[in-house]
Image (tube, helix red, strand yellow):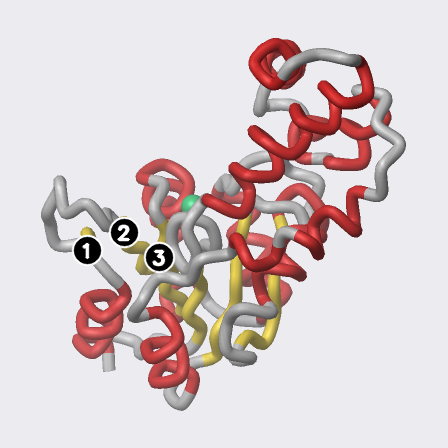
């Protein structure tokens, strides 16, 4: 079996938890909306979450914070908000050590469904080990990490899918879609509710599984 050359990671739920994004989308934006329109937090949140639902996650606007600030009539500087909240980025415990260890052996990249402006803040909390960072909505104008998203990454990286591994916490978008192409994908289940040949409970186990390819 060919060796692994490129190892790709999902970001949220994989390298860092969801608290940074959740804080901005579910607390800060409703709070700013409430301040602007004179609503208490409960009403403001219900209104904003209703607006999100109207757009839905299949449309590119869903991921576009600039669009939401305009749509909700917020005149605050969202870039400043993203910087102010950087301390809410929580890196999973084993991640820095595993990334440092794997960087000696593989080319490491990020393949994320998060917009670039969020990724830029999140990356400052991680070791500087990534050769490339791909954002599906910002760089490739796709809303989901489908097989075509991974195909473009392989072409850009000049790597055969069978020489690439990927890990992430979405069964569909981090495991099934890349596997369609022949990428060695793994499903990260940090709660340990599922098990299987291609399931890992943390990145230590992922690193361990990749040793079988060398
Ligand atoms: Mg994820």
The image position of residue 194, as x and y in percent, is: 13, 42
SS for callout 2: strand
The image position of residue 188, as x and y in percent, is: 27, 51
Check disc 1 and report the residue beneath it: 201
Q: Is residue 46 left or right of residue 17?
A: right
The image position of residue 213, as x and y in percent, is: 23, 75
SS for callout 3: strand
Q: Earlier in the sequence, mark 2 or mark 1?
A: 2
Q: Is residue 134 left or right of residue 147?
A: right
The reply to whether the C-beta atoms of the residues labelled 2 and 1 are less than 8 Å apart is: yes
Please say whether residue 167 is visible from this viewpoint.
yes
Which residue is drawn at the image coordinates 80% and 14% (left, top)?
37
Gap in angstroms between the C-alphas marked 2 and 1: 6 Å
Which residue is drawn at the image coordinates 71% and 56% (left, top)?
83
Residue 188: assigned label: 2
The reply to whether the C-beta atoms of the residues labelled 2 and 3 are less than 8 Å apart is: yes
Which residue is drawn at the image coordinates 28% and 65% (left, top)?
203
The image position of residue 117, as x and y in percent, is: 71, 52
Local crowd size for mark 3, using a 10 Å CA cut-off: few (<14), some (14–19), many (≥20)? many
Please say whether residue 182 is visible from this viewpoint.
no
Relative to 119, say whether 6 is above or below: below
Check disc 3 and report the residue beneath it: 167
């Amino acid at each position: 079996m060919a060796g692994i050359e490129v190892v790709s990671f999902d970001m949220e739920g994989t390298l860092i938890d969801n608290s940074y994004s959740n804080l901005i989308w579910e607390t800060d934006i409703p709070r700013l909306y409430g301040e602007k329109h004179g609503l208490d937090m409960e009403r403001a949140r219900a209104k904003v979450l209703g607006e999100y639902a109207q757009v839905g996650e299949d449309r590119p606007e869903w991921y576009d914070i600039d669009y939401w600030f305009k749509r909700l009539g917020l005149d605050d500087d969202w870039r400043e908000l993203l910087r102010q909240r950087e301390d809410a980025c929580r890196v999973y415990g084993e991640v820095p050590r595993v990334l440092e260890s794997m960087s000696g052996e593989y080319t490491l990249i990020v393949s994320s469904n998060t917009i670039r402006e969020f990724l830029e803040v999140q990356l400052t909390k991680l070791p500087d080990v990534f050769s490339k960072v791909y954002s599906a909505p910002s760089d490739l104008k796709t809303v989901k990490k489908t097989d075509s998203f991974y195909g473009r990454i392989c072409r850009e990286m000049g790597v055969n899918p069978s020489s690439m591994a990927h890990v992430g916490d979405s069964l569909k978008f981090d495991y099934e879609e890349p596997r369609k192409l022949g990428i060695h994908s793994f499903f990260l289940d940090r709660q340990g509710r599922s098990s299987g040949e291609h399931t890992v409970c943390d990145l230590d186990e992922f690193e361990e599984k990749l040793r079988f390819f060398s």
